Image (cartoon, rainbow, N blue to C red):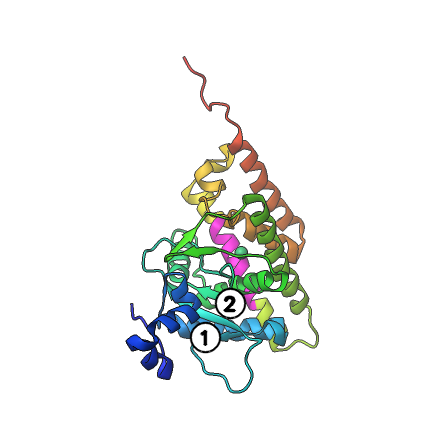
Amino acid sequence: MLKVGLGLRTLLCASMLFAAICSYADPVVERGFQQTLDGRSLAENAIAVVNLLVGDAALALEPAWVELPGNVSSRVAVYVVDDRQGTVVTPAAVPNGCRCVFIFPAVVTEWVRRNSAGLGRIQLDAEQFLSFILLHEVGHLKMGTPGAVFREGRLSQLNVEPSRAKVAEEDADNFAADLLKARMAKTPVGEVSLAANWVVLELTKLSWNMQAFRTLDEFGSFAVGKPLVFFDDGYSHPNLAWRILRVADRIQGSQETRYLLDAFEEARIRGANPAPLYQRQ
Ligand SMILES: [Zn+2]
């Protein structure tokens, strides 16, 4: 992947004289990462959707690689970051100690590929998926809750207290869900309500694909609550499948969305039961 810096800043940062100053000022370098050119147009499109939906100048996201005229101190800079070590498992995050957002395009692409592949799946749209993720990150920014802690080019689990992190994640999801619900209903129907509907449609597709995974690829997992299917992968963000079902239910509030969420939670209870499946001889 290409590593970048741009324009005058790049020239200055390339010199020995300014290298130390630049690495200090750049929150990406500070955390042991590099910016990348990959995924910039994807990020720009998702940022445009999110700014349209949020409609709040104080929370407006701005690509960090675009020079803005005038006073831009209130902007939230978005950096597209290369996960060189392949250890980051989140598509995007608000780094601890920075009013900014990191997007990891390689994680986004791989995540969309993996969750679109297989029997009965619908092809996901990276831009709409990323828009939802960025709405969640705006939720973190609005509430001032910490996102992820990065150190030396890696996602750090240290200093993330699990129960507080879980509440912060649910709050950020609630922000995204409530905003989407409100914007979907916005009248007259126009670009804002249409944009919200596209993102919600993506969540519905994602719900469907995850259900297909649990039903077709992991047939039988529901009956026993197979941990591999129903539990976290160790990151502080709660199980993504559960989060998507929860967000869908918060937005749509139908009997069907409630049933899917309840069924998933009941499977987790079964999976947490240490009783053996088979009687020992
Ligand atoms: Zn989060």
Quadrant placement of the C terminus: top left
What amino acid type should be assigned to the residue bearing mark 2?
Cys
Say which mark, if any, is on residue 140: none
Where is residue 183 drawn, in percent x and y? Answer: 65, 69
Where is residue 124 drawn, in percent x and y? Answer: 45, 61
Say which mark, if any, is on residue 100: 2
The answer to whether residue 194 is seen in the rendering is: no
In reply to whether residue 222 is colored magenta, the answer given is: no
CA–CA distance in space, label 1 to label 2: 9 Å
All told, the count of numbered labels is: 2
Residue 232, above or below 82: above
Residue sitting nearer the eye, 233 or 208: 233
Residue 229, above or below 29: above
The answer to whether residue 269 is seen in the rendering is: yes
Residue 258, above or below 4: above
Q: Main secondary structure of the magenta part?
A: helix
- Identify the secondary structure beneath mark 2: strand
The residue at the far top in this view is 281
- Identify the secondary structure beneath mark 1: loop
In reply to whether residue 209 is colored magenta, the answer given is: yes
Sequence order check, earlier mark of 1 and 2: 1
Magenta region: which residues?
198-210
What amino acid type should be assigned to the residue bearing mark 1?
Ala
The residue at the far right in this view is 187
Q: Do the residues labelled 1 and 2 touch (CB within 8 Å)?
A: yes
Query: Residue 90 vs residue 185: left or right?
Result: left
Residue for badge 1 = 64
Where is residue 168 drawn, in percent x and y? Answer: 59, 53
